[in-house]
Amino acid sequence: MDIELLGVLRVRENGVSVTPTAPKARQVLAMLALRADHLVPVSELIGELWGEQAPRSARTTLQTYILQLREKISTAIGSDPEGSAPRTAKDVLVTSAGGYILNTAGGRSDVREFERLAGTGYRSMDSGDFEGAARQLREALTLWTSSALADVQAGGVLEMEIKRLEETRLCALDQRIEADLRLGRHRELLGELTVLASRYRTHETLHGQLMLAFHRSGRRSEALDVYQRLRNTLVRELGLEPSSRLRRVQQSILMAGPEPTLDAAVLGSDESLSRVG
């Protein structure tokens, strides 16, 4: 089974789509695909579909969605040109104590692949292999085609999962940019960082990276403008001043400090610069 969640929802068995069109059935499949090979409790599925206003018929209706999914899976299994697929629909979508399991039988999941590549990239960063880290993290990020589950109507549970996935994407992006900065690619990053700083208007790490890229490119005043815009946004929207680390970056630029000082301030500490609004 192949699962794609980092964009529109796509689930295939034997290369045949088993993704339903009905919104609530898609929610059920998204929940099962996100937790592939792990039990998803009935109570959690009902909470996702109806929240606290679940009707008395919720369990029966959920069973109907499961049956519809199994019918699509059965059709996909029957399309196997070799006719040798040993699995049945109930082997793929398993009823277990208190819930259901989507059994992928070792198939591909773009979320798992992203997490694997990102983890490899983080380890490369830790070992000082910035070229490898940039390459691995870039490869991981190419798996994202748009926002996670972009075409799925999300309830409370899926919304939290989507936010979690988007945060992992942002962390990988942050680290990939850091690797590129350490490789001296500041000029190449200016356009991308300008867009990101506009999109994530209170994210201090991205703004600090943009300040560093401008400073290294000989554009000191623009680096300082980035700080001032961020400060205005933080004060106006959150009632906060920029972190002490970002203030040190600003001071280093004001004093035309050496780049290694900026690198240490922006990139060299374990303390996070991130504030995501």
Image (cartoon, helix red, strand yellow):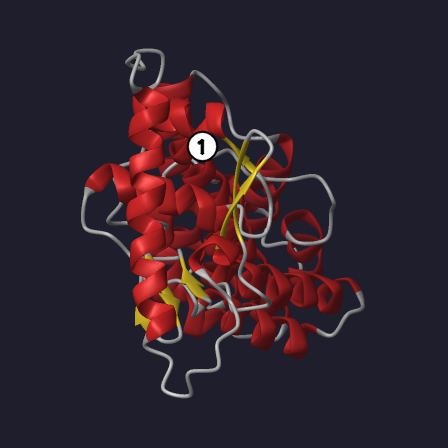
Given residues 259 and 47, the one toward you in this image is 47
Determine which quarter of the picture holds residue 189.
bottom left
Q: Up-down: is 115 above or below 207?
A: below
Residue 241, horizontal then vertical, whole percent: 50, 23
Q: Quadrant of the C terminus?
A: top left
Residue at the spot x=44%, y=52% of the render? 223
Q: Tell me if residue 174 comes above or below residue 63 in the rendering.
A: below
Number of disc labels: 1
Q: Residues within 10 Å of mark 1 (few under 14, many from 20)?
A: few
* Left or right relative to 64: residue 142: right
Q: What residue is pinned by disc 1?
A: 160
Q: Is residue 276 left or right of residue 175?
A: left
Q: Is residue 147 visible from the viewing direction of this image?
A: no
Residue at 73% from the left image edge and 74% from the top image edge:
129
- Could you tell me residue 116's position as x and y percent? 63, 64
Q: Nearer the viewer, residue 146 or 32?
A: 32
Residue 136 is situated, as x and y percent measured from the top left of the image, at 59, 73
The percent coordinates of residue 137 (x first, y second) are 56, 68
Q: Quadrant of residue 220?
A: bottom left
Residue 112 seen in render: yes
Q: Residue at x 43, y 62 (%)?
A: 3
Residue, far right: 127
The type of residue carrying mark 1 is: Met
At mark 1, the secondary structure is: helix
